[in-house]
Image (cartoon, rainbow, N blue to C red):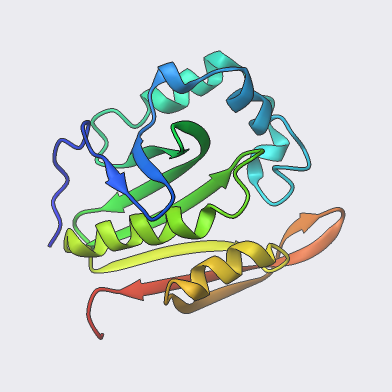
Amino acid sequence: MYQPGDESGLLLQGQRVTLQPFTAADIGPDYVGWLNDRELMKYSSQRFRTHSADTCRAYVASFAGSGNLFMAIRHEGRLVGTMSVYRSAVHGTADIGLMIGAGGRGLGRDAWATMLDYLLAQGTRKVTGGTLRCNVAMVKIMQACGMQPDGVRVGQELVDGQPQDILYFARFNSPC
């Protein structure tokens, strides 16, 4: 079973993206702007918050020593998004979150597949992710990466005043 260790120097290379730990140095006007862009965050709970460099630094700091990961997604050296990975070593599970910023369109699948492959290679028993049903692009990413349906919360969240289901997906390291 996976046991978290020091991954501060982690560098994962996908077909088009590179994943590496996100640091306070990555917090700039573009990143903060993405988080405050209502259209870009239309399917994220981030749309209900106002972000600043200080709130972002606090979020990055919350990962230190936790065994969880907050990764920068880079394409041709430029920050195009982030990934969070919340792990439970005792259960052998990891839950992935993905945010692609302005100018990163089309790179989410490569980032997702790269992290998924890494987690499974590290011995993670089950990798999960969830998204709103109306976030068709994210649903397609998880399906394309071989994840299977793992549950539905019907009408759980509101988007533009309309109830939306949360769809959960999972991929097991080996058959259950």
Indicate left or right for 75 with 66 as reference. right
Residue at the spot 15% in from the left edge and 35% down from the top edge: 6
In the rendered view, would you say 176 is above or below 133?
Answer: below
Q: Please identify the quarter of the rendering in which residue 88 is found.
A: bottom left
- Write the residue at 46% across / 22% down: 26
- In this view, the residue in front, 52 or 118, is 118
Q: Position of residue 152 (x, y in %)?
A: 59, 74
Residue 173, position as x, y percentages in the image: 24, 74
Against 67, residue 55 (above or below) is: above
Direction right: furthest residue: 161
- Judged left or right of residue 9, residue 70 is right
- Furthest residue toward bottom: 175
Picture quadrant of residue 66: top left
Res. 132 in view: no
Q: Is residue 21 left or right of residue 175?
A: right
Could you tell me which quadrant the C terminus lies in? Answer: bottom left
Q: Residue furthest top?
A: 54
Count of numbered circles on the image:
0
> For the view shown, which residue lies furthest in the front direction?
76
Q: Residue at x 24, y 41 (%)?
A: 67
Q: Is residue 99 visible?
A: yes
The image quadrant where one finds the N terminus is bottom left
Q: Can you give x and y, in whole percent of width and height, for residue 107 in the image?
A: 53, 52
Residue 41: x and y in percent read: 69, 43
In front here: 104 or 146?
104
